[in-house]
Structure formats: structure tokens, C-alpha cells
Amino acid sequence: MERLQAFCLFIALAYFSLLTVPALIAYSPSLEATFLDALLNTALLSTLATSVSVPVGTVVAYGTLPRSWRLTAPLVTFTVSVPHTAIGVLLAPSVFGAGLADTAAAVTLAMVVVSLPMSFSVLRGAFASLGVGYVEFLRGIGVRGLGVALMMLRSTRTALISASLLTWFRCFSELGAFLILAQRPLTVGVYVYEEFLRRGAGPVTGASLALLAVALLVAFLLERWTEGAGSR
Amino acid sequence: MLEVVDYAVRAYGHRVEVKELRVSSTTALLGRNGSGKTILARSLLGFLRPERGRVLIEGEEITNLPPELRPIGYLPQHQVSLPIKPLSQLQYVARLHGSDWNWVVERLGLRRVIGKEGLSGGERQLLNLATVLLKRPKALVLDEPTSHLDFANKLLVLEALRSIDVPTLFITHDPLEASFLSDEIVTLRDGKVSAPVRNSMKGWAIDVISEAGELYNEYLRY
């Protein structure tokens, strides 16, 4: 068992090294001020989009718990299975028609649309894991409507926080929809893409490594936190 | 008294029929896994709509009342753990019904449990039972409340259930538990609930389970 674990760790490290070590050796970090602006824009708009996506995902997840409503779930989750450039194309008429192209509102809208399946899926799984008996017990002791929903939310608070973090990262990492809808304000995905097209891989390697470092740090923290929450 | 008259419910590929069921003290509904016991329980609570028939509590029909308004206490098959401390759970439900929670703590001997964190399965089930009793139900429907508990916890819950004087429909697959707790036993077989038979094995079952409890404690000492 220990040998197998050591082997798995080796594979993981080899994979990670393949992505990072040659890049670190070949290019010294060359971060520009524009990158930091893009990073800040993306972080702020991701937070805004998450604050919309998670409540909406929660409400839809709760509302589609009854068997008769489950068939409505794909109306929210279909964006997972469509290329995000196509999502951008689908959103374009409403955004362009409203004069929102290349605005923070368009970026936020795209983020919400692509991240909604994330918050919805995590929370629906968490609600479903409570079991039908949970709701029936609550209703049986006289808890009604919003009281049931709030108690379920308290029971799934770990999932709620995980959903928020994963949703935030889904927003943060989006590119496809932005290319069609809103290349400005500049987001990190668009920054890396544009710089790569203009100047090649070298100059944006520092930015890519910085994004990787941020993602890894948060992934480790998330893993550690959920492990702790699971053992409580 | 809980009465179920000329009743039929269909769900998840099962149909359960009850010609007449009267629960005035403790009645065990005995049936095998998958026989439809839980479907009947959930239907009596109002979570599944019956095809026909009536449910009455103390002569008043409640067939069309929503679950929250039925004067029935319910423990579902899978143990529920609410995300609040034991005392808060009791206080919350007591507030909902404008009642006091102290009596139920005394009745079920929960004084030590309400200050604890990390309850055992049996303690959790006792707490849930206390929570249900705060509603001052006129009947209880308990769906295999001990099926997932170890012997010591099972004994804890069964003893507590014996001390409750609310008409109780105790649903179980275990004939020994049914004999231990009930005054009457009905069975659910081929989708039909039988007429009740008086439980003549109660004394024997109490002796057997009590002796098994002593034996269990004896084993744990080694």
C-alpha cells in the first residue's frame, strides 16, 4: 500500500514538474503592471459573479429536489456541455443589444452563466445527501417553508463554502465566453491569451506561473479545510 | 387513538392496503425489508398521497392535512442529525409549539445528553424522540428507529419507548423488538396489513432482551 502511495505521489510530482520546472528554467518571471490589473479585475468580478451564482444555484438546487422537478435541472447545467465560446455567442445578442459588450457587466454575466452549474451541482448533491428523511423529520416536528430551507443550509454549510470557492475559481478561470462577449475590462485569461498571440509563450510564462501558484495554494487550503470539516 | 380505515397507498412500485388499523397503545407493524412499511409510514404522515381511505386521530379525520399540521410524531428510518446543539434543538422546537422542553428531558433522562457534543447513535435517537414529543403528538409513527443502532444503544431507545404513553405505531422488521415493545402486532405481507394479534410474548421478549443486555455488558468487560 505504501509503495502504491509513493508511486502515486511520484506520478503527481512528475506531472506537476513537467508543467512548471522547464518553464521556470527557460523564462524568468516577467510580470507587468497590466497583469496585476487583470488579476485584480478578475478577482473582483469573480467575487461579484459568485455572489450571484451561489444564491441562484442554491435556490435552484433546493427547488429541484422534489422528483417531479428534477427534469428541470438541465436547464441550468447545460452550459457545462457546450463550448464556452458558443455560450458567448448565445449570450451575445442580449449583451450587444443592451450595449453591454466589453463592460464589467458582460464579464460578470458570462461568469455567472458558466459557473452556475458548479454551485448548483455541489449544493444539490449536498442537499440530496441529507436524505428525504431529514426534510420529513423537520416537517414532522412542525418546521415549515423557509425554516426547513435554512436548517438544510446549516447542515450543508461545508458544501456551501466549497461551492462558493469552486464557483469563484470557475469564474476566475473562464476565457471562452469573454473572447466573444467582453475582452475588456481585461481579465487574466484574456491577458494571457492576447499576450501569447502577440509575443509568444515566453513573456506570459511568469503570469501563467503566478496563476498556477495562486490556484495551487487555494486548492491545498481547500483540501485541508474540507478534510478538517469532514472529520468534525 | 390513531385509526386507519379502508386505506390504500401506491408508491415506488409498491401498493399497501389497510382494511382497518387501530392504534390505542403500542402496535408493532412487522414486515420484511422492501415490504412497503416505510411507504405506509410516510403516507400516514402526509408525505405520500393515498389512493383511498381515511386517517383519524381521536376520531377527527386528518387525511388531507399537511404533514406539519398532523398531530402525529414521526421518526424516520434514517437517523437525522440537525446542525444545532442538543439543547438548542429542543429549545427551537419548544418555541415552535409554545411549549416547555424541561419535562421531556426529565421524562427521557436526557439531562446529561443535552450538554454533550458528539452524541452516540442511541443518544441522538433519544434526542430526536424528545424533539418529536415536544410537539405533544396524539400518536407516534416510528419507522425502524433502532435498526441502525448497536445493542447497547438499541436497548437505551427501546427502554425509553416503553416509558412513553402516547399511542405508537412501531414499525420494524425484528420480531423480538416487536414483541418487546408492543401490545399488539400487525404484519405487512404481500401489500396487505393483517388484522392485529395480541402480543402474548411480551414478557418473554422483555426477559430475553434484558438477559441479552446483561450478557452484552459481561462480554464488554473482557
Image (cartoon, grey):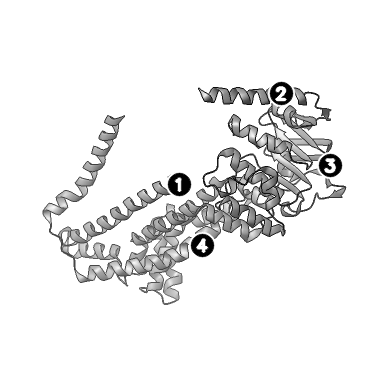
At label 3, the amino acid type is: Glu
Say which of marks 3 and 4 sits in front. 3
Using a 10 Å C-alpha cutoff, classify the residue at mark 3 as few (fewer than 14 neighbours), some (14 to 19) or many (20 or more). Answer: some
At label 2, the amino acid type is: Asp
Q: Which residue is mark 2?
A: B207
How far is disc 1 from disc 3 in space, using C-alphas?
43 Å
Image x and y of residue B221, in percent: 52, 25
Q: Which residue is mark 1?
A: A232
Q: Which residue is mark 3?
A: B3
Image x and y of residue A122, in percent: 47, 52
Say which of marks 2 and 3 sits in front. 2
Using a 10 Å C-alpha cutoff, classify the residue at mark 4 as few (fewer than 14 neighbours), some (14 to 19) or many (20 or more). Answer: some
Q: Which residue is mark 4?
A: A56
A88 left or right, relative to A192:
right
Q: Secondary structure at mark 1?
A: loop
B167 left or right, relative to B173:
right
